[in-house]
Image: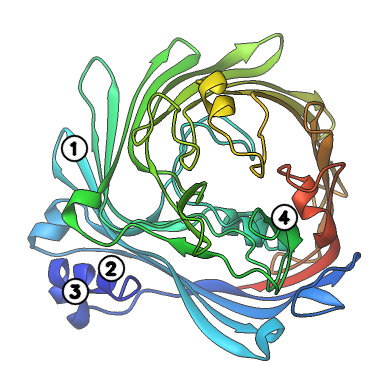
């Protein structure tokens, strides 16, 4: 139903499309393969990625004497047909975009339908970007575009003199896609360690109803060469971090508000950024419920610089602090896992282009000195022609403990190959 509804939205707003000439299709065909480098208890022993993908993309600009043409309306569509051999040739369709963009007033833009939403200043690190992510794709070796999941939403943008304003309404809750044991293993607190197919936990998501609509707000303004932004989010935690019923092994997405700000601009011959966000747990603001995730504070800073000769470097630092930690600690039971109050995370990206910018070599690393874990993502891509591209890379998470962010993924190491033909 979620995949079909955006198409109904388009059908309502653009009935004359059926009588217009079809726009030209673009897209790509891609083959993906991920060879496992470690053992775990998942569905396949030798690989965790084997699929063929066809993406079709079109953009239609309305013309003629009608309301949509007068308002500069644009229809966007992007969808993936997938054959997944990890699941014995299972076929699927992923509707990634199906929306209409128009300007109903001179001071306002409107985008309605399925769309990929993103904001914030982090590189693979997200504080005020509370839109859904696909971390299974991220760790399996799919292209970076699949880290961001689409949302069925209505986005309005306003342009008063004092600032620009984006306001988003999301009636359908879409969670992060996390490892669940069949393709990738993960830490399962009910199993007391890293679990694969033996995991039998259950995730409870908010039902579709008007009161569960999520809202997101961004107010941003240019200050010379800098951009200052303020954010607000009122919705649900995209990760199921709270316990609904421990006896039934049920986790759920608790209500969560996020308030934050960011600043990005030139500094020391490069680009610097700082971002802060406060995650407020609406269901346990005092932190006294051991089954509900506590509020937390996140602060991030970053710096990137172009060193010339197609060589770029970037550094990031993220600090996280659990709020009301003393109350959280005092209410734990003896069998509960105790999460740390503070977490520090360092990230680094190095990128170099060769052979007239047709070869791209990249290395992204995460390291947490508090969790004593990390994640290494090397990759090399080669544009053989304007249409053919091949990418070779690896996902190498590691960690001393099994319950930390990267330590729980250490059995999912792989090398991947992607071959893409664009048209």
- In this rendering, the answer to whether 319 lies above or below 182 is above
- Mark 3 sits on what residue? 11
Q: Nearer the viewer, residue 413 or 154?
A: 413
Whole-angstrom CA distance, mark 3 to mark 2, is 9 Å
Percent x, y of residue 416: 82, 66
- Residue 6: give its label: 2
The reply, left or right, for residue 166 in relation to residue 184 is left
Can you see residue 393? Answer: no
Crowdedness near tag 3: few (<14), some (14–19) or many (≥20) residues, C-alpha within 10 Å: few
Question: Quick one: label 4 or label 3, which is nearer the N terminus?
Answer: 3
Q: Which mark is residue 108?
A: 1
Residue density around tag 4, few if under 14, some if 14–19, many if 20 or more, within 10 Å: few
Mark 3 or mark 2, whichever is nearer to me: 2
Q: Nearer the viewer, mark 1 or mark 4?
A: 4
Label 1 vs label 3: CA separation? 22 Å
Mark 4 or mark 2: which comes first in sequence? 2
Quarter holding the C terminus is bottom right
């Amino acid at each position: 139903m979620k995949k079909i509804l955006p198409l109904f939205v388009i059908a309502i707003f653009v009935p004359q499309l059926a009588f217009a000439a079809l726009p030209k299709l673009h897209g790509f065909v891609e083959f993906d393969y991920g060879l496992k480098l470690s053992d775990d208890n998942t569905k396949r022993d030798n690989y965790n990625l084997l699929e063929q993908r066809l993406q079709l993309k079109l953009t239609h600009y309305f013309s003629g004497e009608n309301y949509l043409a007068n308002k500069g309306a644009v229809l966007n569509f992007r969808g993936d047909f997938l054959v997944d051999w990890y699941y014995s040739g299972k076929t699927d369709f992923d509707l990634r975009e199906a929306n209409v963009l128009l300007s109903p007033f001179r001071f306002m833009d409107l985008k309605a339908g399925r769309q990929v939403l993103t904001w914030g200043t982090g590189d693979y690190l997200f504080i005020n970007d509370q839109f859904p992510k696909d971390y299974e794709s991220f760790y399996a070796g799919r292209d970076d575009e699949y880290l961001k999941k689409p949302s069925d939403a209505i986005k309005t943008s306003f342009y008063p003199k004092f600032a620009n304003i984006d306001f988003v309404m999301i009636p359908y809750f879409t969670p992060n896609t996390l490892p669940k044991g069949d393709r990738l293993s993960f830490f399962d607190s009910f199993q007391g360690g890293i679990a694969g197919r033996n995991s039998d936990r259950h995730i409870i998501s908010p039902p579709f109803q008007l009161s569960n609509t999520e809202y997101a707000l961004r107010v941003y303004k240019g200050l010379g060469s800098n951009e200052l932004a303020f954010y607000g989010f009122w919705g649900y935690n995209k990760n199921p971090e709270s316990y609904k019923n421990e006896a039934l092994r049920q986790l759920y997405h608790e209500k969560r508000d996020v308030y934050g700000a960011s600043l990005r601009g030139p500094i020391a011959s490069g680009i610097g950024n700082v971002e802060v966000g406060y995650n407020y747990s609406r269901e346990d603001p005092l932190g006294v419920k051991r089954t509900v995730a506590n509020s937390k504070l996140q602060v991030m800073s970053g710096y990137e610089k172009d060193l010339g000769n197609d060589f770029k470097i970037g550094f990031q630092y993220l600090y996280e602090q659990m709020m009301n930690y003393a109350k959280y600690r005092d209410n734990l039971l003896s069998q509960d896992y105790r999460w740390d109050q503070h977490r520090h995370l360092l990230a680094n990206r190095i990128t170099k282009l060769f052979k007239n910018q047709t070869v791209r070599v990249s290395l992204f690393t995460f390291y947490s000195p508090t969790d004593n874990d990390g994640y290494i993502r090397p990759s090399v891509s080669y544009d053989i022609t304007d249409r053919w591209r091949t990418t070779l890379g690896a996902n190498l998470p590691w960690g001393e403990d099994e319950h930390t962010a990267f330590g729980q993924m250490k059995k999912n190491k792989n090398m991947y190959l992607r071959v893409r033909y664009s048209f």
